[in-house]
Image: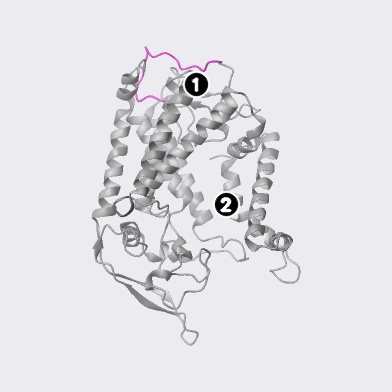
Amino acid sequence: MSTLITIGEEQRQPLLLDPSPDGNEEEIAASSSSNEPDAPKPTLDDSNQRLLSLDVFRGLTVAKSSSRTLATKKVILRTIKLFLLGLFLQGGYFHGRNNLTYGVDVVKIRWLGVLQRISIGYLLASISEIWLVYNVVVDCPTAFVRKYHVQWIVATLLLSFYMCLLYGLYVPNWEFQSPSLNLSTNGSHTQIVHCGVRGSLEPPCNAVGYIDRYFMGEQHLYQRPVYRRTKECSVNSPDYGPLPPDSPEWCLAPFDPEGILSSLMAVLTCFVGLHFGHVLLHYKGQMQRALLWSMSSFPLLILGFGLEMLGVTGIPLSKPLYTLSYMCITAGASGLFLTIIFYIVDVKHFRKPVVLFQWMGMNALIIYALAACDIFPAAVQGFYWRSPENNLVDGMESLLQAMLHSSKWGTLVFVLLQILFWCLVAGFLHMKGIYIKL
């Protein structure tokens, strides 16, 4: 979920009290685009209560600022740091598991990735929260709409722009350099992909890939896209594998699932997060918040599944393209999950069942960098017995596969044990009062 940005320091109190034991954590505060001398200060039902459920959904925050200009500078600075961190982690410098080398040719560096996408969404949502919120005291539902309606106009414009390009942009024939599969031939050769269409959502001819190739070039895109695991491109589908004999020419083409146009659509989920934060700010009853969040989540889920089930005339569920149906389903599911966690933890005060999630949420950035980007597993693999294959990571996974007599079930248990391990690491950091942030 996205966060709220504070503007008027003297008129606002933090939404959440300091989560760190030493009191050094930045405060998450309310926002306004101008001073509101007559506006009531937002307070929680219990001024000493922190919403522990939001530790699971730790968004990026901006420290309290006395002016919109200063808040904008802080947003831009944090955006740059996030983007550069993503470039370092996912730009190709680290080669992941099963590869003990590192380094990247700057000619082939991958410009966009998960953290870069987050930085773009954070920037646009934060700027809209700083500059596009009306000076209206929210004392009724219509006032709530008047205060934030410009943000939803911007979100609608972004959605319209995405849909127009996705279905209206003409994608011509294109070519790329493919590595030769012939053992007697070295180097690469040119592959031609025949398109000449509009509105295609298929892997080779969609507008998302075309825009990325046009502005960034094929060398700067993700080189192992998910469609290489399809039946058309892999004999081991749904896993990566050798090409089938009659595979299409685009199977070896690069495609970035965190590209320019799809990241633009992903920004809308940040606006949904802003909406949830606004409900938290202006509605003080716990059950009222849960009700309003549910009323926002269920329509998104219904719309997303409805678009998916329309078939040929609908909008398919596609993460690489970040289609409208995918955005609605993921945003709605996240909102519903937030509501459930909020009800369990902050309404019913059952905190022990979600303590692992709380720990992970309070140090999400470092856990993502070490685990999801394979930094820690790759480092552990650097210590091996006589050959690189004899390392602790691969040995543990192979042992579980042998014990369960199944490669799939063994891998699943291995992944679950990894998640548990990182939950415990996050818990250790929490107990030591260590919170790593940008």
At label 2, which amino acid type do we have? Ala
Disc number lying in front (1 or 2): 1
Give the image quarter of residue 31: top left
Which of 69 and 89 lies nearest the eye of the viewer? 89
Q: Residue at x 46, y 53 (%)?
A: 113
99 in the magenta segment: no
Q: Which residue is mark 2?
A: 372
Q: Residue at x 58, y 20 (%)?
A: 49
Q: Is residue 26 visible?
A: no
36 in the magenta segment: yes
Element class at badge 1: helix
Residue 287: horizontal and vertical position, in percent?
50, 21
| Scheme by which the image is coloured | one colour
Residue 274: horizontal and vertical position, in percent?
41, 32
> Which of disc 2 and disc 1 is earlier in sequence?
1
Q: Residue at x 53, y 27 (%)?
A: 27
Q: Which residue is mark 1?
A: 287
Element class at badge 2: helix
Task: Rate crowding at label 2 as few (under 14), some (14 to 19) or many (20 or more) other CA atoms within 10 Å.
Answer: few
Is 392 on the left or on the right of 125, as rendered? Answer: right
Secondary structure mostly seen in magenta is: loop
Number of marks present in the image shown? 2
When the figure is inspected, residue 238 is found, relative to residue 89, above or below; the finding is below
Span shown in magenta? 31-46
Is 344 on the left or on the right of 60, as rendered? Answer: right
Which of 282 and 235 lies nearest the eye of the viewer? 235
Task: Rate crowding at label 1 as few (under 14), some (14 to 19) or many (20 or more) other CA atoms within 10 Å.
Answer: some
Is 184 on the left or on the right of 147, as rendered? Answer: right
Give the image quarter of residue 195: bottom left
When the figure is inspected, residue 7 is found, relative to residue 319, above or below; the finding is above
Q: Which mark is residue 409?
A: none
Q: Is residue 145 visible?
A: yes
